[in-house]
Image (spheres, rainbow, N blue to C red):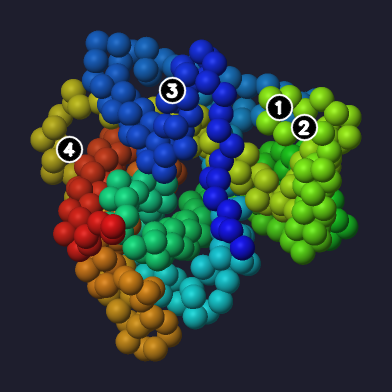
Amino acid sequence: MASRKRISEIPAPTDPVDVVIAPIQRFLKLETSGGIVMLACAALAMAWANSPWVGVYETIFYETKISFSIASLKVLGKHPESIYWINDALMAAFFFLVGLEIKREVLIGELSSLKKAAVPLFAAIGGMVVPGAIYAAINWGEPSLRGWGVPMATDIAFALGVMALLGNRVPVALRVFLAALAIADDLGALIIIAAFYTEHLELMNLALAGVCLSVMAGMNLMGVRRALPYAVVGLLLWFFVLESGVHATIAGVLGALTIPVRSKVDTTNFMAFSRQRIDELDEEGKHGESIVTSPMQQGLVQSIEDACNKVQSPLHQLEHAMAPWIAFVIVPIFALANAGVPLQGDLTALATSKVPLGVALGLTLGKPIGIVLASWMAVRLGLGTLPRGVTWKHLHGAAWLGGIGFTMSLFIATLAFPSRDDLNASKLAILVGSAIAGVVGLLILWSASKPKK
């Protein structure tokens, strides 16, 4: 039997518009693109906050007030500034995507069994405990001790983006390991946010949030697969969690856990149906035409499209649809609003502050030490093994990439520090520490592997 040539994708038309937008589309498909856009926005924020137009920056993000009411309920009435809309509303969508990733990995991914999950879970725990302990030791007895959670987070998008720069020099299994570690790390960060950065609780609103969550879970059990009902109830869940005193982004994760992970049809039925329809399409009409003119052909193509939609679970559909918006809109806006640190103040006071020292050392020393040590313990105890093709030098490099805190660290810092001075000091330390961790991790991984032919 003659072997069929594998076609990775259908060739796109080459009209003038496609020629213009093709480079943009190729850029958006790169693993590193989201990190590049986020880094560019962070750099812009730093330049803007230290330029003659710093007043415009402050006005847009810290002084502009936005609020609206539903009946007599005022949404974000306590903090109507735009920075709170970004951190409490837009970032809820980011954490919704994080919740989808956590659920996928726990049910069908690298965290789905104890043997698979042991080393990444141990690594995540070690990568949180050691940085937190380093920060706490430096800031012990000070009000700034409240920021112990800041250096414990890993920015999954940035870490994987930096690793992607190495291409095939890095084993695929190492990328999977780092993704699983970062997702487990995100889960730990969410628990810390809910448990330690909640100021007060409004029990009535918390109960109403529980009702909304129960309704969403019930819809899952009843087989509801459309996104709109989940979106409507999810918005109510977000509002009641916001009003309860628990940080509103937790609503995004809780809502994501109710999204169905099973599809309407199984893959066996899908493959049989699709083959049959493709065979019928093959028998119908002419081939090589640029337009499908036969009503029969149009119906067959539409039936194949419908089958493709049904074989994908709502969780995968939402994850696929939201990922570009999160990577290229929401996270860059967050970086632009939160990474602007004015340096015109007293740099001596900044240098002697314990906050940036604790954050920077936590990210650049605590993360790699904690991840490597905890991974070694998991392997030594026989709970798991290193992924195939991954050496301890590979894992050491990945551990440094785990020190890229950026998005999650900046987010926790906004919760931990009511003082603008401490917040700015921690932001600067996050940016510097993440940059050092990324560069060192990149160099270690570069020296650990050779490109595959």
Residue 289's tag is: 1
Q: Amino acid at mark 2?
A: Lys
Q: Position of residue 132 (x, y in %)?
A: 32, 61
Q: CA distance from mark 3 to mark 1?
A: 57 Å
Q: Quadrant of residue 240?
A: top right
Instruction: Mark yes or no: residue 327 visible.
Output: yes
Residue 286's tag is: 2
Residue under label 3: 62
Choose the circle earlier in sequence order: 3 or 4: 3
Label pair 1/2, CB-CB below 8 angstroms: yes
Relative height, residue 340 to residue 131 (above, below): above
Q: CA distance from mark 3 to mark 2?
A: 62 Å
Instruction: Mark yes or no: residue 249 visible.
Output: no
Residue 350's tag is: 4
Per the image, label 3 sits on a secondary structure element best described as: helix
Q: CA distance from mark 4 to mark 1?
A: 68 Å
Front of the two marks 3 and 1: 1
| Residue farthest to the left, as pictured | 348
Instruction: Indicate the quadrant containing the C terminus: top left, top right, bottom left or bottom right.
Output: bottom left
Q: CA distance from mark 2 to mark 4?
A: 73 Å
Horizontal relation, residue 41 to residue 117: left or right: left
Relative height, residue 39 to residue 21 (above, below): below
Q: CA distance from mark 1 to mark 2?
A: 7 Å
Residue shown at 62%/27% (left/top)?
77
Q: Position of residue 213 (x, y in %)?
A: 75, 53
Q: Amino acid at mark 4?
A: Leu
Q: Amino acid at mark 1?
A: Glu
Per the image, label 4 sits on a secondary structure element best described as: helix
